[in-house]
Amino acid sequence: MRKLIYGMNLTLDGYVAAAGDDIGWSGPPSPELFRYWLDHELASGLSLYGRKLWETMSSYWPTGDQRPDATPAEVEFARNWRDTPKVVFSSTIDTVDWNARLVTGDALSEITRLKAEDGGPMTIGGATLAGAAMRAGLIDEYVIATHPVLVGGGTPFFTALDGWVDLNLVETRTFPDGVLLTRYERRR
């Protein structure tokens, strides 16, 4: 059975985007934090995206390695992003590319099916998609990079749940830019 990992950057008050889907608060990550996310993605066998995150990622990373100012880590990230199989969940877009397939039907049924397959860990991104998976009890691990900024509202990392989810702290790390990374596994 595959592990499903939900990891994103968020504000100290718990938002992945400020009002208006503004993610400018996260700024460019430190080289160390970027490397952490690159290693996280390299370990993933399959990436699951909601529509908004897909549109953000697919507007930049297909050619991110061709930018004249791209760092070696960014080049590696872009190449890995293109090569990693992806599933995009959306009822409002018609096509996807870059080694992705589109699912327009029941996301939770498809995620459950994918988890039951053999293979490496899967990452899930996009607060709405991850929130549905969280409510369904499908998330096995949470990776939270908390930035030292308050935005006062926007898109929350965590969704309202029907019950408690007990977690075990697996890792904590502080980056030079003041970002605190915590990683938790769901207790079974």
Image (cartoon, rainbow, N blue to C red):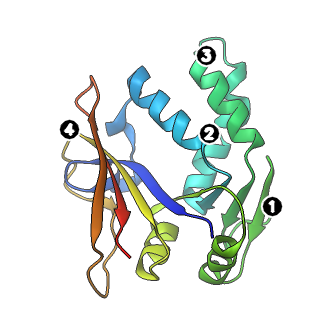
Q: Which residue is mark 4?
A: 148
Q: Secondary structure at mark 4?
A: loop
Q: Is 132 above or below relative to 93?
A: below
Please tell me which residue is depicted at 22% across the width and 30% down the height of the picture. 178
Q: Which residue is mark 3?
A: 72
Choose mark 1 or mark 2, whichever is in front: 2
Check disc 1 and give the amino acid type. Thr
Q: Which residue is mark 2?
A: 42
Image coordinates of residue 163 in percent, x first then y, are 28, 86
Give the distance between the C-alpha atoms of the residues marked 1 and 2, in whole angstroms. 25 Å
Mark closest to the chain's N terminus, 3 or 2? 2
Give the distance between the C-alpha atoms of the residues marked 3 and 2, in whole angstroms. 14 Å
Query: Mark 3, residues whose alpha carbon is within 10 Å: few (<14), some, or many (≥20)?
Result: few
Mark closest to the chain's N terminus, 3 or 4? 3
Q: Which residue is mark 1?
A: 95
Choose mark 1 or mark 3, whichever is in front: 3
Q: Secondary structure at mark 1?
A: loop
